[in-house]
Amino acid sequence: MKSSLIVLALVAVVAADKIPDFVVPGKCPAVDKKALFDSQKPNYPKFSGVWYEIALTKNPYQLLQQCVRNEFSFDGQKFTAKSTGINADGNLMRRNGQIVAMPLGDPNLSIDYEGSFMAPFVILDTDYENFACIHSCVDLNQGYFTDFAFIFSRSPSMSAQHLKQCETAFKNVGFDNSRFIKTVQGASCPYETQKAL
């Protein structure tokens, strides 16, 4: 965790000699990560499989911008992550990573993709079959923090009921749901090609 904070701090300093707009005053919301971690851990095999990104917050580390399809494979210890989608140049792209227990014993998962930094991966809510609400938050020095959030669905579309469940989960930790940006999904997405990447 400390190495993640150091990397993020360096990114913030080097970015343009100013604090990036995704680093804001305040602190991460109070989330009972241990209770979530303990209840979800036995169900990790059920979290495996394909998840489509329905919405996310502004995130400079998310290079996939449309048709984002995540495939998570659990081996009993960690998830291998493969994400595919269309980048800002309009090209198909694949990113590889992993989701593992936080290395220093924090009671939550962490996500680590190539070309990014390790960050918390907290599943605020999921039914494993339809929706997952993911929050990643890091407290920084001097009263600043950064967070990113994602809404995942097992299909490229999401029912209003399941979307509402995620919105409620985020609202319950004081998150501003107006920050979400809808991810383009649907008939124009090359899902079959993405599976083969």
Image (cartoon, grey):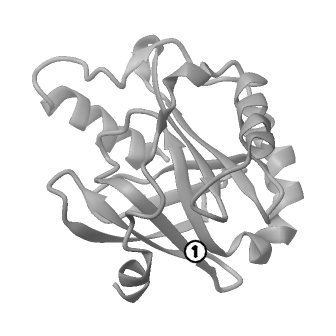
Q: Quadrant of residue 164?
A: top right
Residue at position x 48%, y 66% in the image: 69
Residue at position x 41%, y 16% in the image: 24
**Which of 156 and 138 lies nearest the eye of the viewer?**
156
Q: Taking 76 as reference, is 195 left or right?
A: left
**Which of 84 and 27 lies nearest the eye of the viewer?**
84
Image quadrant containing the C terminus? bottom left
Q: Taking 177 as reference, is 188 left or right?
A: left
Q: Quadrant of residue 42?
A: bottom right
Identify the residue under disc 1: 72
Return the x and y of residue 168 as percentages of the image width and height: 78, 29
**Which of 147 and 55 lies nearest the eye of the viewer?**
55
Give above or below for 187 relative to 120: below
Q: Residues within 10 Å of mark 1 (few under 14, many from 20)?
A: many
Residue at position x 61%, y 75% in the image: 78
Q: Which residue lies furthest to the front in this view?
A: 187
Kind of residue sitting beneath label 1: Phe
Return the x and y of residue 1 as percentages of the image width and height: 50, 47
Q: Taking 138 as reference, is 168 left or right?
A: right
Q: Quadrant of residue 133?
A: top right
Return the x and y of residue 7 as percentages of the image width and height: 30, 43
Q: What element carries label 1?
A: strand
Q: Which residue lies furthest to the left in this view?
A: 16
Residue at position x 72%, y 69% in the image: 47
* Labels in figure, total: 1
Q: Taking 19 as reference, is 134 left or right?
A: right
Give above or below for 15 relative to 105: above
